[in-house]
Structure formats: structure tokens, C-alpha cells
Amino acid sequence: MNLETENPMSSQQVDNSSIPQAKRTAELEELLIDAEADDEQVQQSHPILRRPWLLLLGLILVALNLRPALSSMAPMLSEVSKTLGLSAAQAGLLTTLPVLCLGLFAPLAPVLARRFGAERVVLGILLMLAGGIILRSSLGEIGLFAGSVLAGASIGVIGVLLPGIVKRDFAKHAGTMTGVYTMALCLGAAMAAGATVPLSEHFDKSWALGLGFWVVPALVAAIFWLPQVGQKHGAHNVAYRVRGLLRDPLAWQVTLYMGLQSSLAYIVFGWLPSILIGRGLTPTQAGLVLSGSVIVQLASSLAAPWLATRGKDQRLAIVIVMLLTLGGLFGCLYAPIDGLWGWAILLGLGQGGTFSLALTLIVLRSRDAHVAANLSSMAQGFGYTLASMGPFAVGIVHDWTGGWNALGWIFGIIGLGAIIAGLGAGRSLYVQVESEKV
């Protein structure tokens, strides 16, 4: 076995001033997070796609399905809890389990991709996601929790694989395609948040049918993805080993920022409609507010990384988007209800920026794609596991206090922690690792 050590690194300052801006932007687009970049199968050349439009359509449809299973539950949570007799702690667990599964099952994605191929895995996991949605809408409380676990695990695996497919098959348009992918994620979340309650009312006020409706787009995506299973991609065997990541403080700062901002995001997905219903809104109105806030994320998720890479580092951008997020959260919780839409828009602008910057930091703190793949796995695995604690804590506090006013402390603590971690992660440094080619 031949070991060739590449890129021994220290957490050293990156001289952005010496890099032309156009080159920096191009490097950012090329260093996308690739779940398969560190696998044994590394592409020898980019494949020539016979029907790229079909792959593009398939990617969009798959991405649209990565949030409805999460955001559809939020506006229905009060009704589901009332029907099944769930306590606030149990409801918090219901919102926590899918997020926890995002972190626990994400590391399986490269293993499955090596064994079966990324396209086959995406198809199989889409069908598993559909099964989870059906299970969640049947068999009562047991099915509700089991289906939530299955759906969360499915989303965790697919979410890691799709950026790698984008990078491989659309390498010359990686930045644009990543933007399209992010927009599809947000649109899927917004549609589910806004449409689930009206769908439930249409189906004789059945929460099970309202939640179960989202199996339809999952199956449609599977049908349009089916042609990709037969695609062949030439590759040669190269294995990479990245050492020292778990010992690097900068890597943990990136991971903590990813986890804490995600915690706030999944609190919003899981609990914001219930909070607004407690303030006097109807379930339909609460779902529309969440949907509108998510739609606003489209703008900031595209703009924030572009603006952040124009400065010497990302610390100021991180502070700004986190303050916008906290301002929106506190406004939705405490401000007069007449101004709710303004606070929801502020929240959307902040959270779209926090999420896209979390992904951007993984790229900017990595010297090459192999390091980025490992840092991505670390940040998503540990980060989403940490993020799952936020929704559960909200349920516990609501059970203890019987209201929502005490949640401001949770928002403040998580937000302050994210700012502190972000100030470390936003410095213009590289993680200290060694990348070895075997």
C-alpha cells in the first residue's frame, strides 16, 4: 500500500487579499460538499449526460421532498397531540426524532453509495421515505413515532448524497445547481407548511390524510428518478484518509455553529405554528406564517454566502444573520400580533442566511474537497444530533410552565452559543488536518 501524504495543514491564516476575487468564487463553487468525494470511487472524468434535463428534473423533485415530512407536522402538531393525547414532552420528542435521525443516519450515505451506487440508493431511500410518511399517518401513536424515525433517516441519507451528484454531473454549473437545489428545499418546506392544514380540512378534517398526502410527491420523485439508476459513471479506485479532524478546534467550531443554528431552525419547523396558535391564530393562519417565512429564506440563502465571501472573513455576516434570526424569533413570541408578518419575514431572512452560511463555512474552512467531505460528515453528523435537543427542550419547558413565554431563554442561549461558535468558525483559517492518498 502506497501512502502519499498531501496537504499537511495547520489552522493558518488564509490570505484572501492575494487571491483574485473571480478565482475565489470559482474555487468556492468547485469545492462543494461531496458525500462521495472521500469514497473509494472517485470520478475519472465527468460523464456526458444523454438527458441532462431529466436528471435536473429528478434532482429538483427529490430535493422538494427533503423537508415536507418535517414541516408538514408543525401546523398539525396541536391537532395530532389532542387526538392522540400526547403531552408537550411527547410532542417535543415527535419533533426531535426526525432531526436526531438526520445526524445519526447521515454517515451511512457514503457507505451505501459505495456498495450500491448513489443513484440506486436515492431511489431506494425515496421509497423508504414514502413508507415512513404512510406509516406516520397510520397505526396510531406507534406508527406516528416509527414513521417519523423512518422519514428522518431517509432524509438524512439523501441529503448527503444529492450535493455529490450535483458536483459530479453538473461540475461546470455547480454553483448555479446548488442554488437550485437549495431553492427546491425551501419550496418543499414552504408548500408543506402552508398546504397541510387546508389538505386536512379538505379530507374531512383528517390529520392523518393531511400528513399522508405528502407520500404523493415522494412517489412522483421516485418515478422521475428511476431512469438515473441505469446510468453508468466511469471511475477508478482512489482512497483518501483525512487525519486530525476531531482534534481540531476550528472543525468543532464549524460543527457547533451548524448544530446550534440548525437547532433554532428545527424549533421553528416543529413549534412555531403551535406557538402562534397559542397566541390566537388558527392552524391555517399559523401554517401560512411558517410557509411565508420559509419562502423568504430563498432570497437570503442565495445572497448571504455571496456577500460573505466578499469580505476578509465571515464573522460579521454570521453575527448579522443570527441577530436577524433572534429578532424574528423574539418578535413572533412577544411582539404585538398585528406585526407578526414583519417578524416572520425577518426570521426568514435570518434563517436562510444562517443555514447557507453553515454550508459555506464547511467549504471555506477546507483546503480541498476530501477535507470538505470529512468536515461535512462531522458537521452534519454531530451537528444535527445536537440540533435535535432544541425541539425536545421546547416541549419540556412548555410542559413545565404550561405556556410559551419562557422559550425566550432557550432562543437566547442557543443564539448566543451560535454567535460565539460562529465567531470562531468565521475566521479565515483552514482546519488542521493531514489528507493522505492510499
Image: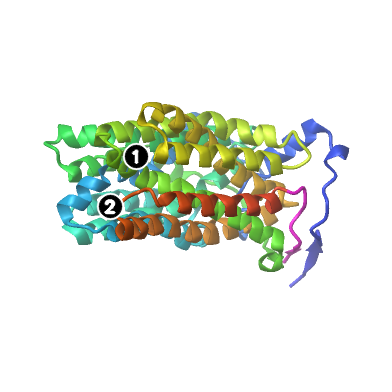
Q: Which residue is mark 2?
A: 131
Please, is residue 351 above or below residue 432 in the view?
Answer: above
Which badge, 2 or 1, comes first in the chain's sequence? 2
Q: Residue furthest left?
A: 204
Apparent side of residue 14 relative to residue 370 in the rendered image (left or right): right
Q: Is residue 349 above or below residue 313?
A: above
Question: Magenta part of the protein: which range?
Answer: 427-438
Residue type, numbered disc 1? Ile
Q: Which mark is residue 223?
A: 1
Q: Nearer the viewer, mark 2 or mark 1?
A: 2
Locate the C terminus and report the quarter of the image it occupies.
Answer: bottom right
Is any atom of residue 337 visible in this view?
Answer: yes
At a point 14% along the width and 36% down the height, the residue shown is: 203
Quadrant showing the N terminus: bottom right
Q: Is residue 35 visible?
A: no
Which of the 4 quarters of the picture holds residue 309?
Answer: top right
